[in-house]
Image (spheres, helix red, strand yellow):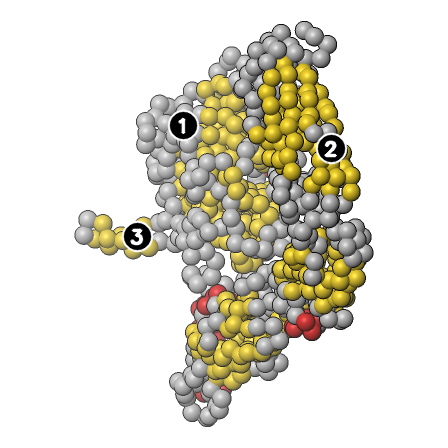
């Protein structure tokens, strides 16, 4: 290949060009001096051109040559259409760049062009240092604008700002400018924004137009965003209670007119708002209401009213009742960070239908009625749970009981109230789970939390120091019933057993955030999972390190599972079909290898696991390949009906049971774990309240089942708490029996 693969010839070498006149042109002859076929292209460059300007000031013909053989040439014609640099007059060098895609070479040549004063009008160039600005009502905003005169003649220009209200512009919307040739003038428009209600929050497009006599106008656009500010003021008469009826006579009256409240709104913001009304607090308070208008549009600075009429049911007797309800309006535009202008608690004073003097006359009847409806009446079914009680637990010092029910509530109970008639037992609702509760378990550390397993698979954690406050709510599989819960001793982990056969280990945070909203469960991945081939109804740790767990459930399955190694040992139990269940498993805290089970065929079995556990009491216990010993077993404890629950005392000397026959019983045990001979039929503690049902055409007494029992040693007594299908929670006690040789009780000792 030659040293220069491309040669060029330009004719003429100098050229005169007057913009606006006839186009000027010159020829470029390109010679292929290479040894291969090649095509060529031209590009014209001029110093001082705008980097963003398209190459529309010249035209090349042809745009691309055909591929020429070595020694052949192509003649290009270049026509100048416009001034490369608008407004420039004088000599200018144009650089012609010739290149080829086939050759790794290019050449550059120069032609001198004498550019004369043209006849094409040249527009002014308007630029904005800031194209988008943000401001708040009341701000003083400066908007800089730069105007450049590209021509070679001085000019007088008018710069006009459009898009903002003229009243906002301190020095007006127009400026008269004198601009020298090739010079730039900077102008600042000052904008004083009005106060909040006079400045609508939106984005204002702004246009700047610069006109002059020598050419067309120049333009530039910008925008100003007015930020939201202010608030809606809400006022209602919430200082005095409105009386229903307005006048109260001496005779009984059933009249209960609706009471009207005027809700005043003042939009002191720069947003156009629509006020709506949230009726939920009123409907939750069992009040009727009408609202006019249902929605209230408010422009900035406007005021408006809503008329709220409330209807309430008056009490029959007693003193006047005071009711309050929350007036909770909402707004549609939340750009100020809130969707409500606030709320007010409005008050009602409801006079009884029967006047006070008549109330006094029927005080004896009322006293009887109050007694009948109070906790002093043992047959009162108007407090406590309203559906079957499925689960109970008792705190570490035996002073409080927690229960869960099909009525979807968790309730607290004062143990002292079960033994002292004038102390109320029911401590109220500690949690509303929104689903039937299958099992509850108190946190073993501090007893300040209760965890609940629900029918739909949710696990909820409730704080007992803030009754009704949900701390956590999670699930792994929806609609997978939670049938068993077991805390680890340090309360950092929780185990759950499910109807699908899953056993899950959860990390329970001690710093869970209290929630104030309705409980909404969230999916969570457990720390450990184990799938069994039967529905899991009961869990219990069987040695101090809490590594070995007893798992029991459907098909009469009972296994010991090493949670560290996943080793599993099946305990010998009566074969069962799909309708056979081990419903309960319990281990003694101080003798964890003493295990008791109960099934739906009425069998209670006591096991000694020491023979089948190696290293019991160490950090790494293992399962031995030896059978576990059955110490005692019987099926007549509850009339051969299902035994729903069993609970060993901490020292393993007493076994409490609750059955389908409605009985709660206690079985004193010998030191080896067998039943004491003197109490082979157990001690009957309490039975559920009977109800009449027709069977075979006759009315018979039916005793609802005892669903769960828990026991606790406290001083010289054994406390037994139970929950049953008759909606009752019971706490009973029975004297301890150290004379049997198992219970080493001394005065003041508790577990």
Q: Nearer the viewer, mark 1 or mark 3?
A: 1
Q: Quadrant of the C terminus?
A: top right
Dot 2, how many residues are within 10 Å of its Cα: few (below 14), some (14-19), or many (20+)? some
Q: Nearer the viewer, mark 2 or mark 3?
A: 2
Rendered residue at 68%/31% (across/down):
44
Residue 155 shows which numbered tag? none
Rendered residue at 76%/66% (across/down):
176
Residue 259 location in percent, x, y? 48, 82
Residue 540 location in percent, x, y? 53, 31
Q: The residue tagged with tag 2: helix, strand or loop?
A: strand
Residue occupied by mark 2: 14
Q: Quadrant of the N terminus?
A: top right
Residue 373 location in percent, x, y? 45, 68
Asked if 485 appears above or below 62 in the picture, the reply is below
How far is disc 2 from disc 3 in space, using C-alphas? Answer: 125 Å
Asked if 677 appears above or below 736 in the picture, the reply is above
Residue occupied by mark 1: 534
Is residue 326 or residue 91 the one in the foreground? 91
Is residue 382 or residue 484 the one in the foreground? 484
Q: What is the quadrant of residue 588 in the picture? A: top right
From the viewer's perspective, tell me whether residue 228 is left or right of residue 461: right
How far is disc 2 from disc 1 in space, using C-alphas? Answer: 100 Å
Is residue 517 or residue 322 the one in the foreground? 517
Q: Tell which circle, 2 or 1, labels the residue nearer the N-terminal end.
A: 2
How far is disc 1 from disc 3 in space, using C-alphas? Answer: 35 Å
Residue occupied by mark 3: 701
């Amino acid at each position: 290949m030659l040293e220069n693969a491309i040669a060029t010839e330009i004719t003429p070498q100098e050229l005169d060009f007057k913009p606006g006149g006839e186009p000027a042109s010159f020829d470029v002859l390109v010679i292929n001096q290479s040894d291969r076929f090649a095509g060529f292209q031209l590009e014209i460059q001029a110093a001082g051109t705008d980097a963003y300007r398209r190459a529309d000031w010249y035209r090349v013909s042809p745009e691309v040559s055909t591929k020429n053989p070595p020694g052949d040439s192509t003649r290009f014609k270049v026509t100048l259409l416009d001034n490369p640099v608008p407004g420039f007059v004088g000599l200018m060098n144009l650089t012609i760049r010739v290149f080829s895609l086939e050759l790794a070479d290019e050449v550059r040549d120069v032609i001198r062009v004498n550019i004369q004063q043209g006849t094409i009008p040249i527009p002014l160039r308007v630029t904005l240092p800031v194209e988008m600005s943000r401001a708040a009502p009341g701000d003083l905003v400066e908007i800089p604008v730069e105007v450049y005169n590209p021509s070679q003649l001085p000019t007088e220009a008018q710069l006009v700002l459009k898009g903002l209200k003229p009243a906002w512009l301190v020095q007006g919307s127009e400026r008269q400018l004198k601009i020298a040739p090739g010079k730039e003038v900077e102008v600042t428009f000052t904008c004083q924004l009005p106060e909040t209600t006079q400045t609508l929050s939106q984005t204002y497009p702004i246009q700047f137009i610069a006109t002059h006599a020598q050419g067309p106008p120049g333009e530039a656009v910008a925008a100003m965003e007015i930020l939201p500010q202010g608030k809606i003021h809400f006022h209602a008469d919430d200082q005095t209670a409105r009386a229903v009826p307005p006048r109260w006579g001496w005779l009984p009256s059933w009249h209960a007119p609706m009471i009207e409240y005027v809700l005043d709104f003042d939009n002191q913001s720069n947003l156009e708002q629509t006020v709506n009304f949230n009726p939920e607090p009123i409907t939750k308070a069992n009040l009727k209401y009408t609202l006019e208008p249902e929605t209230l549009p408010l422009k900035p600075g406007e005021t408006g009213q809503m008329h709220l009429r409330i209807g309430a049911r008056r009490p029959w007797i007693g003193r006047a009742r005071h009711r309050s309800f929350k007036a909770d309006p909402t707004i549609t535009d939340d750009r100020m960070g809130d969707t409500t202008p606030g709320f007010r608690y409005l008050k009602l004073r409801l006079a009884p239908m029967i006047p006070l003097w008549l109330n006094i006359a029927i005080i004896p009847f009322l006293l009887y009625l109050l007694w009948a409806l109070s906790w002093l009446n043992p047959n009162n079914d108007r407090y406590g749970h309203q559906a079957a009680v499925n689960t109970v637990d008792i705190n570490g010092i035996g002073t409080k009981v927690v229960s869960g029910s099909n009525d979807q509530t968790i309730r607290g109970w004062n143990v002292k109230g079960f033994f002292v008639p004038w102390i109320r037992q029911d401590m109220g609702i500690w949690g509303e789970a929104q689903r039937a509760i299958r099992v509850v378990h108190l946190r073993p550390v501090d007893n300040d939390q209760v965890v609940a397993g629900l029918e739909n698979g949710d696990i909820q954690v409730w704080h007992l120091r803030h009754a009704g406050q949900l701390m956590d709510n999670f699930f792994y599989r929806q609609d997978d019933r939670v049938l068993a819960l077991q805390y680890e001793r340090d309360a950092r982990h929780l185990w759950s057993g499910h109807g699908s056969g899953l056993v899950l280990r959860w990390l329970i945070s001690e710093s869970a955030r209290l929630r104030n909203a309705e409980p909404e469960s969230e999916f969570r991945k457990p720390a450990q999972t184990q799938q069994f081939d039967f529905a899991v109804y009961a869990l219990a740790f069987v040695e101090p390190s809490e590594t070995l767990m007893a798992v029991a459930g459907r098909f009469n399955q009972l296994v010991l599972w090493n949670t560290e190694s996943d080793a599993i040992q099946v305990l010998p139990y009566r074969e069962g079909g799909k309708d056979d269940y081990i419903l309960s498993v319990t281990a003694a805290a101080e003798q964890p290898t003493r295990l008791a089970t109960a099934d739906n065929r009425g069998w209670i079995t006591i096991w000694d696991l020491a023979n089948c556990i190696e290293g019991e009491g160490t950090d790494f216990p293992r399962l031995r390949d030896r059978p576990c010993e059955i110490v005692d077993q019987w099926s007549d404890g509850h009339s051969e009906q299902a035994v729903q629950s069993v609970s060993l005392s901490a020292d393993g000397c007493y076994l409490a049971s609750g059955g389908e026959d409605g009985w709660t019983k206690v079985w004193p045990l010998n030191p080896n774990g067998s039943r004491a001979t003197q109490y082979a039929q157990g001690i009957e503690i309490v039975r559920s309240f009977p109800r009449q049902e027709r069977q075979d055409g006759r009315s018979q007494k039916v005793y609802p089942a005892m669903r769960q029992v828990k026991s606790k040693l406290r001083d010289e007594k054994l406390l037994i708490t139970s929950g049953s299908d008759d909606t009752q929670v019971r706490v009973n006690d029975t004297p301890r029996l150290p004379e049997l040789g198992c219970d080493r009780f001394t005065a003041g000792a508790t577990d």
